[in-house]
Amino acid sequence: MASGDRIKHIFGKSRNIAIGAIHLPPLLGYPGFPGIEIAARNARRDLLAFEEGGFDAVIFENNYDIPHVEFIDPASAACMAVIGKEIRSAAKIPVGISVLWNDYRAALAIAKVLELQFIRVPVFVDKVKTAYGIIEGRPKEIIALRKNLGARDVALLTDIHVKHAKLLSHYSLEESAHRAIAAGSDALIVTGQWTGHAPGFDEIAALRKMIGDFPMFAGSGADKDNVVELCRYANGVIVSTALKEGRNKPHEVNVKSYRQRISERKAAAFVRALQNHR
């Protein structure tokens, strides 16, 4: 199945796709772990807020397992599988997973077991330096593992020039895009430099011209005020921070606390703004 067809098959459309991110709390082994029942309950609350707000899909992530590691330990993997099962069982919309920092192994395994529709791979073809070490993309290994797990139906949404990282490879954004497409990505994700920062409009406009109709998502910084402009070029957006209740938290790398839930009101306003884009 071609990438564009796969994206349309998963989300039921190919434009104006709204994916809500469910940020899990610190998981087992990290300070602040609230227990699996509370973590699952809050994930279901965020799922419901996204669904009632009119979102097309959700993706859950272990954002607050700080410090991150490239490949997570069994305790975190077990928590993500258990909470993911709760999300998947309750969801009326497609569900994906992102395992930070770049654990495609756990992501693909959990996606296969839970029958999730897609995963996010922050580093696919680039080489980057993060606060948690240097991470180099392994596209051949990722594609081979997906095949070996019998998970070919799981779509790969792959970042290029990902946020929270210094690029060490010498590819331009367009070169990284073409490398990712050639390596087997199903959709590209472009971001700003940090959580809450949107990619530049000129940047994604130029990228759209270079990649033609290949699927692309804006993976950070979307809000009700800029989503229409972002979706002039992107097929959709992945959003969470702008839709959480309460104020931003100073010195919080994820901008808001894991205790702040998704606001159904904000989610609905976001979707209404997106629906103004034709």
Image (tube, grey):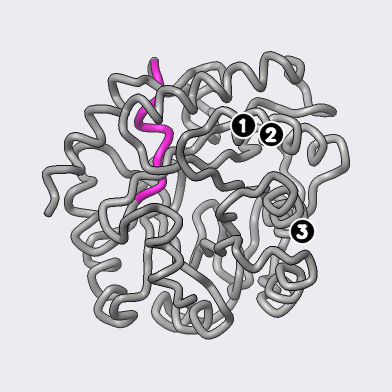
- Specify whether residue 238 is painted magenta: yes
105 displayed left or right of 64: right
| Residue at 49% across, 66% down | 161
Residue drawn at (39%, 30%), measured in percent from left and top? 51
- Real-space Cα distance between discs 2 and 1? 6 Å
Q: Is residue 33 left or right of residue 96?
A: right
Q: Nearer the viewer, mark 3 or mark 1?
A: 1
Helix, strand or loop at mark 1: helix
Q: Residues within 10 Å of mark 2 (few under 14, many from 20)?
A: some
Give the residue number, with chain letter if any, for mark 1: 89
Residue 105: image tag: 3
Residue 211 lies in what quarter of the image?
bottom left
Q: Residue furthest right?
A: 74
| Span shown in magenta | 237-245
User: 32 above or below 242?
Assistant: above
Which disc is residue 85 wearing? 2
Residue 117: numbered disc: none
Instruction: Give amino acid for label 3.
Output: Arg
Q: Which mark is nearer the camera, 2 or 1? A: 1
Check the image and report above or below for 122 versus 50: below
Question: Is disc 3 surrounded by few (<14), some (14 to 19) or many (20+) residues within 10 Å?
Answer: some
Locate the C terminus by quadrant: bottom left
Provide residue 117's location: percent of width, then percent of height. Answer: 56, 53
Q: Amino acid at mark 2?
A: Lys
Instruction: For the residues labelled 2 and 1, say whether their Cβ atoms are less than 8 Å apart.
Output: yes
- Measured Cα–Cα span from mark 3 to mark 2: 17 Å
Separation of disc 3 and disc 1 at Cα?
A: 22 Å
